[in-house]
Image (tube, rainbow, N blue to C red):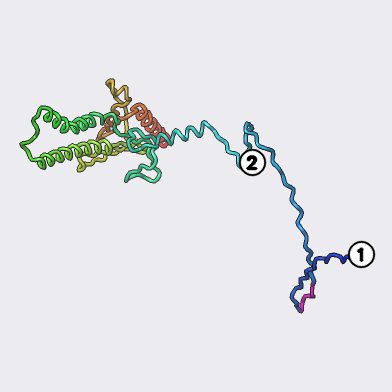
Amino acid sequence: PICVVMHKRSPLPTPPTVILETPKNDSLPTQTIEKQSARKPMQEKIVAPSPNKNAPVMLPQEEQITFNPAIDLSIGAEERRNAIPLFASFWQNPHGVYFDTQEANEHILLFLRRHFITNVPWIFYTVLLACLPPAVSYIFTRISYPFTFLPAAFMAAIVAMYYLVLATSSYLHFLDWYYNISLITPKRVLDIELKDLVYKKISATKISLVQDINYTQTGTIRTLFNYGEVLIQTAGAQDNFYVNSVPKPEVVVRIVEELIGKGREEKDSATL
């Protein structure tokens, strides 16, 4: 015979209750806080639809960026125009350019140099003279008549001296172009002249003393590259100003004429 023994199943133990008691205080009664363990409800998961490659991406309202081609392209053009001031010959409304006697409320309207094309003659002669010693040596080698009557060290010293003089001459020509500039502000016209590193002349006149301005542009090269001579005539014993080989002379004349007309209008209104 099989004997089956059945035991009564005991219930599962309940989770313990955590009792937190506040520290005793004479002024406050004893409080008992019962904390039961409970799970936070699961937040609803939002599944975004799969993005469509052809659909435009919409940004929130605070993150949307507006693009105005007319404004942005004009700003980019202005930055590109002022991006290379090193070899600039015509620089309108320059940034980062100052002079010693500049007043607090005075800004530069025009920064002028001679047109860069005027440097072509001395650059051409410099390159030609730099190629002269190797060409002479090659010719004498081809005719089997080397420089055997001079020591090699003496010949090297002569060639080094030759290139040093050539480099110095080129450097002086560059400085003569780079540091001879003219500045036009709403209040005055300045002309800075530097020669041979030892001669410096600064001439200035007020816009109110300018009587007339004109320019001359003759020749095919000047017309093709659009540069010419600008003459600024002043009143009284003031010397006239000559701006040689300046690019866009018609723009220079127009800007100075506007300044002269504005100054005369202000003078007439002050008189009345």
Residue mark closest to the camera, 1 vs 2:
1
Q: Residue furthest top?
A: 220
Q: Looking at the image, is 198 positioned above or below residue 265?
A: below
Q: Quadrant of the C terminus?
A: top left
Separation of disc 1 and disc 2 at Cα? 74 Å
Which residue is found at the position 15% from the left and 40% from the top?
160
Which residue is found at the position 64% from the left and 32% from the top?
55
Q: Quadrant of the N terminus?
A: bottom right
Tag 1: Cα neighbours inside 10 Å, few (<14), some, or many (≥20)? few
Mark positioned earlier in the residue sequence (1 or 2): 1
Q: How many marks?
A: 2
User: Which amino acid type is shown beneath numbered disc 1?
Assistant: Val
**Disc 2 on helix, strand or loop?**
loop
- Place of residue 71 in the rendered image (x, y in percent of width and height, measured from the top left): 51, 33
Q: Residue furthest front?
A: 1
User: Which amino acid type is shown beneath numbered disc 2?
Assistant: Pro
What residue range appears in magenta?
A: 26-31
Q: Is residue 39 visible?
A: yes
Which residue is found at the position 62% from the left and 42% from the top?
62
Comparing 173 with 1, the one in front is 1
Residue hosting label 2:
60
Tag 2: Cα neighbours inside 10 Å, few (<14), some, or many (≥20)? few
Q: Looking at the image, is 244 positioned above or below residue 203?
A: above
Tell me, for residue 40, which label it has, or none.
Answer: none
Tell me, for residue 4, which label it has, or none.
Answer: 1
Prevailing SS of the magenta stretch: loop
Left or right position of 145 against 66: left
**Disc 1 on helix, strand or loop?**
loop
- Place of residue 48 in the rendered image (x, y in percent of width and height, measured from the top left): 69, 41
Picture quadrant of residue 166: top left
- Place of residue 233 in the rendered image (x, y in percent of width and height, measured from the top left): 29, 30
